[in-house]
Amino acid sequence: MNSFTSKKNKFQKLKGDEVIFDNPHPDIHIANIPIATACWVKTTEGIVVIDTLLKNIHGEQMYNKIKTTTDGIIKYLIITHGHRDHHGGYRPFMQDSPEIITQSLFLERLEKYKIQAPYQDRVKSIQFNMPMKKVTPEQLEKWRQIKYISPTKLYDEFFSFKLGDKTFELYHARGETDCATWVWIPEIKVAFVGDLLIGRFPNIGNPFKPTRFALPWARTLEKIREKKPKMIIHGGYYHPVYKDYEVREVLDHTIEAIHIIHDQVIDYINNGVPLYDFINKVKLPEYLQKSPYLTSQYSRIEFAVQNIYRWYHGYFDFNPAHLLPVPEATINREILSLIGNKASILNRVQELISKHKLQLALQVLNIILFEDMKNVEARKLRLKILKEIREEDNCMISFNIWTYYINEDKKFISYYKS
Ligand SMILES: [Zn+2]
């Protein structure tokens, strides 16, 4: 059993939409589900909620907990960024009619979720290993009718307000999204940073998503560090509260890691090295590889490298054959006809598997699969390769992507057996 399998078991224990609460500071409560953390802050004149988790059932548990532990009214609801596990549970909070504050680019993101609903659903189901919805006219209509949270106050770069004994300073940041907000309360020196930290290596790159931000992300963490927080609460699932020495360490390590990866990618770009010649060469120094704040259980360095490259570099890799290329299927068909038979490709793939050159085996197999997805022998080999790759993978996103295609191959093979 690898470490991700044991983490999966932890998820299973927490499933069933149960919200876990904690109280890391006399005036702060956190609410945690297996993918996100939200919180609320007590002031002498009411409550400020930061994020609402994913679903109504989560929001309800948060709302009920607030109402059973305090007699305060929820005056403000701040959303740290557009990912739905941070605002999907908003409805129960509307009973108190709070001011709802987001950064102004938040609305564009919600629009994107509507116009891209089938794609977003496909991504979500693969990334989080969840059932995929069938795209029917009824489902499309359902997606069109979704009522997302509606902010009552948008801000661009900075906004602050005072409620009772506390000041809330809201700063715009670019991290996982371009609409991120981090919140600073100077009276208690606590920073709420949304998914700018997630308890793991930051999710700077996601294979399904548009480019995210590396340098602005590091610079935002530097600004947070300048405030010298006593406590940081982030929006991820794992270890959502940092106190004491951890605050400085998590910031130092994460800032350093982003700069180091970023600068290496820039060097390779400036030296004209193609992406796939350097993607596995970008490394963190040993002390950061061992950092407990930068483990790859959620995202991984290769994704960050891809992302930073795409941010700074166009699609053209200085190979004239790639300026206006034909579809990959067309070129693979040519190669297949030159080889003349599929058996020699299958044999070579077997050899590569036995030498543990799994990624190369996967790509060589594509010469057959582009032309013939129903080739049972090729699909059996792909299943074998994917299982071996997954066995060694401790990153949730790539683990779940392998799992999706493992299941597809299994379904296909059992269909052709019967
Ligand atoms: Zn997020």
Image: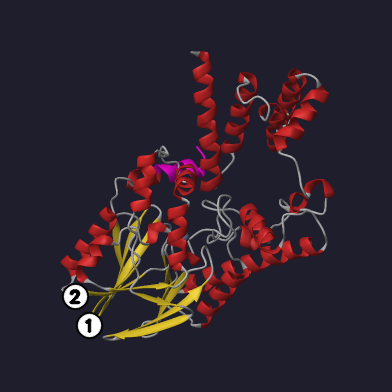
| Color scheme of the displayed model | secondary structure
Q: CA distance from mark 2 to mark 1?
A: 7 Å
Q: For the residue marked with disc 2, what is the amino acid?
A: Gly
Look at the numbered discs 2 and 1 and tell me whether their residues touch, using CB distance below 8 Å. Answer: yes
In the image, residue 329 above or below residue 110: above
- Residue plotted at (66% across, 28% down): 369
Bin the neighbour count of mark 1 within 10 Å (Cα to Cα): few under 14, some 14-19, many 20 and up.
some
- Residue plotted at (37% across, 42% down): 139
The residue segment tinted magenta is 1-9
Task: Point out the tag, 2 or 1, that comes first from the N-terminus.
Answer: 1
In the image, residue 89 above or below residue 136: below
Q: For the residue marked with disc 1, what is the amino acid?
A: Glu
Give residue 106's position: percent from left, percent from top.
Answer: 44, 67
| Helix, strand or loop at mark 2 | loop
Task: Identify the residue under disc 1.
Answer: 45
Name the side, left or right, on which 283 lies relative to 374: right
